Image (cartoon, helix red, strand yellow):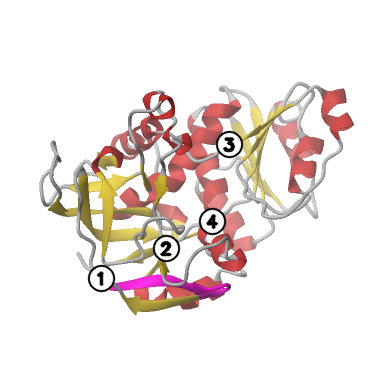
Amino acid sequence: MKAAVFRERDKMAVVDVPKPTPGAGEVVLKVHNCGICGSDLHAVQYGIGMACDTVMGHEFCGEIHELGTNVNGYKVGDRVTSLPYIVCGACDACRRDDSMHCAKILGLGLGQLPGAYAEYVRCGVGSLLKLPHNVSSREGALVEPLSVGLHGVNRSQIKSGMGCVVMGAGPIGLSTLLWAKARGAAVVVSELAPGRTELAMKLGADAVVNPNVESPSDKVKSLTGRAPEVVFECIGVKSTLSSAIGMVANHGRVVVLGVCMEADHIVPLVCIMKEISVDFVLAYTFGEFQETINAFSSGQIDAKPMITDIIEVDQVPAMFEALKDPGSHAKVMVEFPH
């Protein structure tokens, strides 16, 4: 089967790889859609120990093509999405729906198990969630990034009427924006790129500001009369955490969703004097995946405008190059015939 793989640092390729076979408690999906994630771009840029010909891709949905043994509750043809890992399901972390911290976790698409930039992908049945008929396959592949935003918003303890800043209007920033608006917050997005500014407004931001021109914190004050109670850092580059700490109100909360891959620094005294909380968040829970699916199905969340590009798997290497300067690109979706 055809798949997009990590070849070497800063280089992707499209190759033929063997079609997977399901083991006990596993299924093989025929992939419908798989999103390109910022973590994928970082992984290729820095290498992070991935072997040559690692099949990448972890934001996906598809239909069940083949069942392994000991699989109950699913049948061939069911349309599903999946958390991008296989876990034990029995440890303390798994039992409290914190399976990202399962000691036996095997992740899909970042080096341990093959991912979904491929025609077929092998998944654990315990990670599957069925998609309702009124949730499209493209939306199914958005469940993973939307659940990242939901996890951050859940950790923020944001409430209706609060003001917040979302730093960055990439896919995770836009996901965070959608959930913060769903909770009734006033949301100001900080973004430099004009194309992404337009998209953030389309998705419901109360305002979008260029931080080189206008203070996002001052914009929140103009809307609510207060400094932002919450700042979501969704950029993940050096110095943005310090900027977030500088913006947030006294007794406020900074939630860090951006993945910074280099050493950074903050001044703890600023945090102390303001008595703020700084939360670093990772991924999502199974429950948050289901909540996202339910929100799509009910119409509570409409994330389809996030999808700016639909490409074929052969175009993945070129798109990885293009996304080094994302411009107006937001969520790029790799789509397979289905």
The label number, if any, that marks residue 281 in the structure image: 3
The C terminus - image quarter: bottom left
Three-letter amino acid code of the residue under disc 2: Met
Mark 2 → mark 4, Cα distance in angstroms: 11 Å
Instruction: Say whether disc 1 or disc 2 marks the residue closer to the N-terminus.
Output: 1
Residue 17 x %, y %: 30, 73
Q: Secondary structure at mark 4?
A: helix
SS at circle 1: loop
Q: Which residues are magenta?
A: 1-11
Categorize mark 3 by other alpha carbons within 10 Å: few (<14), some (14-19), many (20+): some
Q: Position of residue 159 (x, y in %)?
A: 57, 22
| Residue 171 in picture, x, y percent from top left | 52, 52
The label shown at residue 18 is 1
Q: Which residue is found at the position 29% from the left and 47% from the top?
A: 81
Q: Please tell me whether mark 3 sits on a helix, a strand or a loop.
A: loop
Relative to 71, 320 lies left or right: right
Per the model, the C-alpha gap separating discs 4 and 3 is 14 Å
What residue type is disc 4 on? Ser
